[in-house]
Amino acid sequence: MLIYTGVIVGLSQWHFSPASVQPPVVNLVPFWGLGQSLSAGGLAVLINIVGNIIAFMPIGFLLPLWHRLGRQGRNVALIGSGISTTIEALRWIQGQRVTDVDDVMLNTFGAVLGYLVFWVLTSRIFRSINNNRSENII
């Protein structure tokens, strides 16, 4: 879990394209950046939105396995949001690219989605185990 978080923080600080050489921008208005991006359209927008969500899904999935605090959805959302906010703060401090509250929202959604996948899978596994136990008793 800690290694994955370190990788995410490290990768988020890299410049992947010439567009990232622009002067730093800070967006603290929820949904403003998403609205601007969606109105511009293009594959890069889809990659950005889906990428922000997918990047944090493993956090939501791994956190319940790593620590008991991660077994509650609220805690997963808070921790995912905290990690994402830390990443955005580092970008702002370093004057890199765009610091965007929308990224925090998408990352948090990704962590919660990962937690929901974990919850569904573990519920089915435990249900299957319980069904097998009850069949063996009879």
Image (cartoon, rainbow, N blue to C red):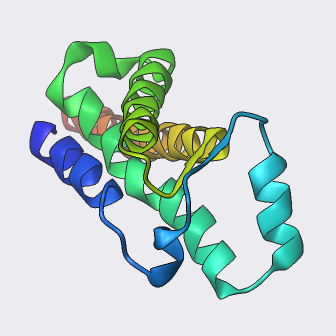
Residue 22, by quadrant, is bottom right
Q: Residue furthest left?
A: 3
Residue in view at x 58 percent, y 41 percent: 109
Residue that sits furthest to the right in the current view: 39
- Numbered disc total: 0
- Rendered position, 75 above or below 55: above
Q: Choose between 3 and 132: the one closer to the eye.
A: 3
Choose between 97 and 87: the one closer to the eye. Answer: 97
In the figure, 98 relative to 36: above or below? above
Q: Relative to 31, is 55 above or below? A: below
Q: Is residue 111 visible?
A: yes
- Left or right of 136? Residue 115 is right
Is residue 37 toward the left or the right of residue 128 in the image?
right
- Residue at the spot x=16%, y=39% of the render? 1
* Residue extending farthest front: 23
Name the one closer to the observer, 63 or 2: 2
Nearest the camera: 8 or 96? 96
- x%, y% of residue 82? 42, 24
Residue 122 appears in the figure: no
Q: Position of residue 107 (x, y in %)?
A: 51, 45
Quick one: quadrant of the C terminus?
Answer: top left
For residue 85, side relative to residue 66 (left or right): right
Residue drawn at the location 49% of the way across and 40% of the way down = 116
Seen at 31% across and 55% down, the residue is 13
Counting from the top left corner in percent of width and height, residue 129 is at: 25, 38
Q: Position of residue 64 (x, y in %)?
A: 28, 28
